[in-house]
Image (cartoon, rainbow, N blue to C red):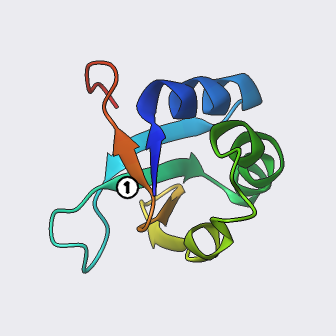
Amino acid sequence: MKIKKSEFITACEDAGVNPYAGYSGRFMYGKTCIGIVGDARDMMTFTLDVIKVVDPDFEENQDAWRDMRQDNMGLDMIYYWPQIEVEEDEPADR
């Protein structure tokens, strides 16, 4: 599954969530995916406000969204979805 980078970043920023478009987590071997950096409150905001904007086919893609993982980044966490790739539609800066 792929989502457009600009839509992902805009939806996250509109919801007040810090987007990370291009994260490569453990055992991903260089493959990149979407993620957000923050705490549990940010994760809940993302779940309620962002997914419905960036994925109009959510019902069909539930398995990809359920495969959420997290890594500790020191003060914050990154929550990421290995099965959801970013389509580059603007210069990579995040």
The image quadrant that residue 28 belongs to is bottom left
- Asked if residue 17 is positioned above or below residue 57 in the image, the reply reads above
The image quadrant that residue 87 belongs to is top left
Residue 78: x, y in percent? 49, 58
Q: Determine whether the residue tagged by mark 1 lies in a helix, strand or loop.
A: strand
Q: Badge 1 is on which residue?
A: 33
Q: Is residue 9 left or right of residue 11?
A: left
Residue at the far bottom: name it: 27
- Asked if residue 45 is positioned above or below residue 24 in the image, the reply reads above
Image quarter in which the C terminus is found: top left
What's the residue at 38%, 44% (across, down)? 86
Residue 46: x, y in percent? 72, 48
Q: Is residue 83 left or right of residue 13?
A: left
Residue 69: x, y in percent? 51, 74
Q: Is residue 24 left or right of residue 43?
A: left
- Asked if residue 87 is positioned above or below residue 60 in the image, the reply reads above
What's the residue at 71%, 57% (across, down)? 58
At label 1, counting other C-alpha atoms closer than 10 Å, the crowd grade (few under 14, some 14-19, many 20 or more) is many
Q: How many marks?
A: 1
The residue lying toward the viewer, choosing from 89 and 70, is: 89
Residue 2: x, y in percent? 43, 49
